[in-house]
Image: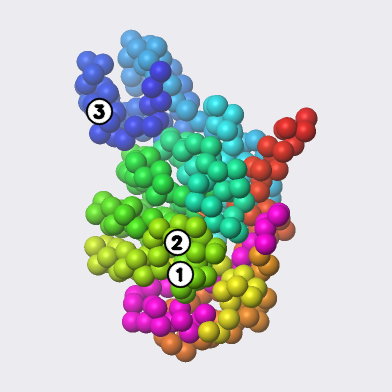
Amino acid sequence: MTDIKNMTMDELKNYMKELGESPFRAKQIFEWIYRGAGQFEEMTNLSKALREKLAERAYISGAEIEQKWVSRDSTVKYLMRFADGELAECVVMFYSYGVSMCISTQVGCNMGCRFCASTQGGKVRDLTAAEMISQIMTAEKDIGQRISHIVLMGMGEPLDNYEEVIKFLRIVNHESGLHISYRHITLSTCGLVPKINALAEEGIPLTLSISLHAPNDEIRSKLMPVNRKYGVKEVIAASDRYFERTSRRVSFEYAMAAGINDSVACARELAALLAGKPVHVNLIPVNPIEQGEFQKSNGKTLEIFAEELKNREINVTIRKRTGGDIDASCGQLRKRRRETERAE
Ligand code: SF4
């Protein structure tokens, strides 16, 4: 059986041809899927014969809410379950400019960042494009509002699931799909240089956000094993190329861990690394995880660090953590649920 939701418009047109149908049917089916149809029989402008043919060969996948938490600041965190029972986390945040959703792209992660709960059991599997879309559609149904902005920053490294993520982006952007502008989409990566270079050639002008977290290889390799493969200078060069190809300013995430990467010397080294580049730095206190070895930097340290960058003309924002009272960073909700299931 084929998951018809995991097809771009072009793939669906080809599928219609294979079934001996007019490619025009693809547009009708696509529109039904993104209006929320879960069964072919709901697609009343298709002939009964075609609906039956589709039901014999294909299905429309979805995601169910396994657990849900609502924070005092109205942030909603979900644990969603897919058809095979695997779980992924996602978060909805309400802003003055719209509703933003952070989705997962893999179950678990292989990248091994030392401050991250998502990677503690390794990668279980990649999510399909349809499963990424289902996180959004299930949340939209639950909150009764449209998601206007997407952040690929939940569980998983998006560029380690490259083909499905590109397919996801093309479907959510399509005018008959969720029709979300690429400019409202942010993709976060730990810095897989060859994939950043490939993404720059796709003609998808999204915002690239690179997790840097350190101004040099010595500190970054301690925090992020991926740095042993793609060092700080290579990552910065890839971000320069990304800007050249897309004209999109790159963001750098910098999680501040007390006594590790939050000194004035680190701020000055970071400023020197980024001097004159059209980039933005987001500072955020690292989220301490269970069995993690890092503590978050205090507010004063963040301010001093930001001031050092500003004084050297680097654009910088200190970001708040939303949904803090839910007390679960990415990867912890799934981990706890799995531990509970094992105990039951
Ligand atoms: S921070 Fe992102 S890339 Fe690093 S281990 Fe966690 S999910 Fe993977």
Q: Are marks 1 and 2 in contact (CB under 8 Å)?
A: yes
> Dot 2 lies on which element?
helix
Please give the name of the residue rendered at 44% of the width and 60% of the height, measured from the top-left corner: 228
Q: Which mark, by number, is residue 13?
A: 3
Residue range (magenta): 266-293
- Sooner in the amino-acid sequence: mark 3 or mark 1: 3
Q: Is residue 99 above or below residue 241?
A: above
- Badge 1 density bin: few <14, some 14–19, many ≥20, Cα 10 Å: some
User: x and y percent of residue 320 in the render?
Assistant: 60, 68
Q: CA distance from mark 3 to mark 2?
A: 42 Å
Q: Nearer the viewer, residue 71 or 66?
A: 66
Seen from the viewer's position, the closer of residues 148 and 259 is 259
Q: In this rendering, is residue 66 above or below 53?
A: below
Which disc is residue 40 wearing?
none
Label drawn at residue 227: 2
Q: Residues within 10 Å of mark 2 (few under 14, many from 20)?
A: many
**Type of the residue with mark 1:** Asp
> Whole-percent x and y of residue 211?
47, 63
Q: Nearer the viewer, mark 3 or mark 2?
A: 2
* Local SS, label 1: helix
Q: CA distance from mark 1 to mark 2?
A: 7 Å
Circles 3 and 2 in contact, beta carbons < 8 Å: no
The disc labelled 2 sits on which kind of residue?
Asn
Q: Amino acid at mark 3?
A: Lys
Residue at the spot of label 1: 217
Q: Residue placed farthest to the bottom in the image?
A: 311
Above or below for 229 versus 157: below
Q: Nearer the viewer, residue 93 or 47?
A: 93
Residue at position x 68%, y 67% from top?
Answer: 295
Which numbered mark, 3 or 1, is in the foreground of this view? Answer: 1
